[in-house]
Amino acid sequence: MYKDLKGEGLEILAFPCNQFGAQEPEDAAWILDFVKQYPVDFHMMEKVDVQGDNEHQTYKALRDASELEGGELVWNFEKFLVNGEGKVVKHYRKEWDPKSIVPDIQALLK
């Protein structure tokens, strides 16, 4: 998806987090090295907490501006669609296949 749409303006920011089932216990350097085995060419951000006392400000803003209204994220791979002005357009729970949101992304890129 990113490969196909980055030329039209799509940006993907991935934030590693260890708050869900302790699935990301390693440090940032290890994570960056690990993803090299996959065709990841979007932005891998720093490892962060996405909720709780050390919640990263990006996630606070995303959650507060979405239908979550500050509510809890339930698992990794939740997605937020943000328009070019920085407004949260939609939040997708982990069950959403990224490919299924392509029409929403394309509508914003027009």
Image: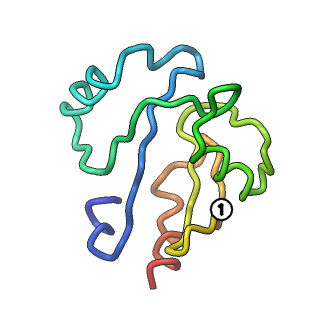
- 108 vs 27: above or below: below
Please identify the quarter of the rendering in which residue 44 is found: top left
Residue 41 drawn at (x, y percent): 24, 49
Please identify the quarter of the rendering in which residue 15 is found: top left
Judging depth in this view, the residue of 89 and 58 nearest the camera is 58
Residue 35 drawn at (x, y percent): 26, 32
Q: Is residue 25 left or right of residue 77?
A: left
Residue 109 drawn at (x, y percent): 44, 79
Residue displayed at 38% across by 41% down: 45
SS category of the residue bearing label 1: strand
- 66 vs 53: above or below: below
Judging depth in this view, the residue of 100 and 46 nearest the camera is 46
- 42 vs 73: above or below: below
Q: Amino acid at mark 1?
A: Lys
What residue is shown with label 1?
Answer: 90
Residue displayed at 26% across by 44% down: 40
Judging depth in this view, the residue of 53 and 83 nearest the camera is 53
Residue displayed at 69% across by 25% down: 53
Q: Report the quarter where the C terminus lies.
A: bottom left
Residue 31 drawn at (x, y percent): 31, 25
